[in-house]
Image (tube, grey):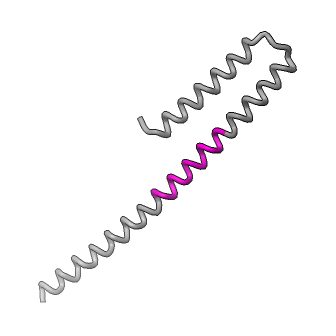
Amino acid sequence: MSKENVVIGVLAGIAVGALLGVLFAPDKGSETRKKFSREGSDLADDLKDKFSELIETLEAVKEEAGKFYEKGTDKAEEIKNEAKTNMS
């Protein structure tokens, strides 16, 4: 299981737990709505943070993939030149 799936599962569990806790709480409707609003804001902030982390990770992977590609291209060119030299 990947880290991202675990994070998504944990966030979903927190959201469901918060929702059930608020729904079964013996508060007035106005208090319940305030709690929903706070929980929603907290969840949105958490999701924004996780999304930002995901974007940073993807950017790092993209950079590493570019470096890997460049090394591979350079190595292929080197092998090609060696082959030409050996054939002549």
Residue 82 drawn above or below residue 4: below
Image point 75% across, 12% down: which residue? 25
From the viewer's side, name the closer residue of 24 and 76: 24
Left or right: residue 57 versus residue 19 is: left
Q: Quadrant of the N terminus?
A: top left
- The structure residue drawn at horizontal position 64% and vertical position 27%, both measured from the top left corner, is 15
Give the magenta range: 46-61
Q: Quadrant of residue 35?
A: top right
Q: Is residue 1 magenta?
A: no
31 relative position to 60: left or right: right
Q: Residue furthest top?
A: 26
* Picture coordinates of residue 71, whole percent (x, y): 33, 70
Please name whichever residue, 35 or 83, is drawn nearer the observer in this view of the structure: 35
- Residue 19 higher or lower than 7, as above or below: above
Give coordinates of residue 84: x percent, y percent: 18, 84
Farthest residue to the left: give it. 87
The C terminus - image quarter: bottom left
Q: Is residue 82 left or right of residue 22?
A: left
What is the number of callouts on the image? 0
Between 43 and 83, the one lying in front of the other is 43
Q: Position of residue 74 (x, y in %)?
A: 31, 75
Up the image or down, 50 lies above or below 26; here it is below
Q: Does residue 62 sit above or below 10 in this rendering?
A: below
Q: Which residue is drawn at the image coordinates 53% and 35% (left, top)?
A: 7
Predominant secondary structure, magenta span: helix
Residue plotted at (27% across, 73% down): 75
Magenta includes 51? yes
Residue 46 placed where, x, y %?
A: 64, 38
